[in-house]
Image: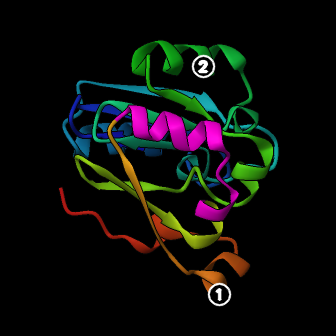
Amino acid sequence: MIDRARGLGFCGLSERCDEAGAARMHEAFGLRATLMFDLAEGEYHTNVVLALLAGRAALICPDGFADGEVVEAIDRLYAPHAIHLSPAEHAAFAGNAISLAQDSVWMSAAADAALTTATRSSLEAAGFAVRSVALDAIEAAGGSLRCCVGEIF
């Protein structure tokens, strides 16, 4: 996960990415710093448990991280807009969101439907309107919105 506004990388280590892959990402994108951390058992991809929104907010699925101290560090970095997602929001892929503009966050329709009132209020306080699109077939296969986007850097 890359915060382009801050030049930071966040790399959850799993069977999909190891330290060598994180180092290659860091170098390829010319990042200022990259935080490597272990994902929780069963998690496979950082962009399912962490969404960084326009450099000023973060959607965080705390259960997706092996170490709570990593969650606390991300909280401090994105305060006051570090938004913790519930297990139900996590399961609905709300952590697989993307901000394509300064004032909106996109996610799947299932993720949007799973958002709690508190999460919606927190996103609004951070200046984001929620936008969504139906992705039933993609989510049935274990992916969601961010998985469909080929970002250009």
Which segment did they paint magenta?
112-126
Residue 6: quadrant of the picture: top left
Whether 123 is among the magenta residues is yes
Residue 142: quadrant of the picture: bottom right
Horizontal relation, residue 7 to residue 98: left or right: left
What residue sits 61% from the left and 45% below the top?
A: 49
Q: Amino acid at mark 1?
A: Ala
The percent coordinates of residue 130 (x first, y second) are 44, 56
CA distance for labels 2 and 1: 32 Å
For label 2, count other residues whose C-alpha is less than 10 Å away and answer few (under 14), some (14-19) or many (20+): some
For label 1, count other residues whose C-alpha is less than 10 Å away and answer few (under 14), some (14-19) or many (20+): few
Considering depth in this image, is 3 or 91 the residue closer to the camera? 91
What residue sits 71% from the left and 39% below the top?
A: 64
The percent coordinates of residue 30 (x first, y second) are 19, 37
As drawn, 98 above or below 127: below
- Mark before the other along the chain sequence, 2 or 1: 2
The percent coordinates of residue 90 (x first, y second) are 70, 50
What residue sits 29% from the left and 34% below the top?
A: 55
Classified by dominant secondary structure, the portion drawn in magenta counts as: helix
- From the image, tell me which residue sits under label 1: 137
Whether 78 is among the magenta residues is no
- From the image, tell me which residue sits under label 2: 70
Is residue 44 visible in this depiction of the protein? yes
Q: Amino acid at mark 2?
A: Val
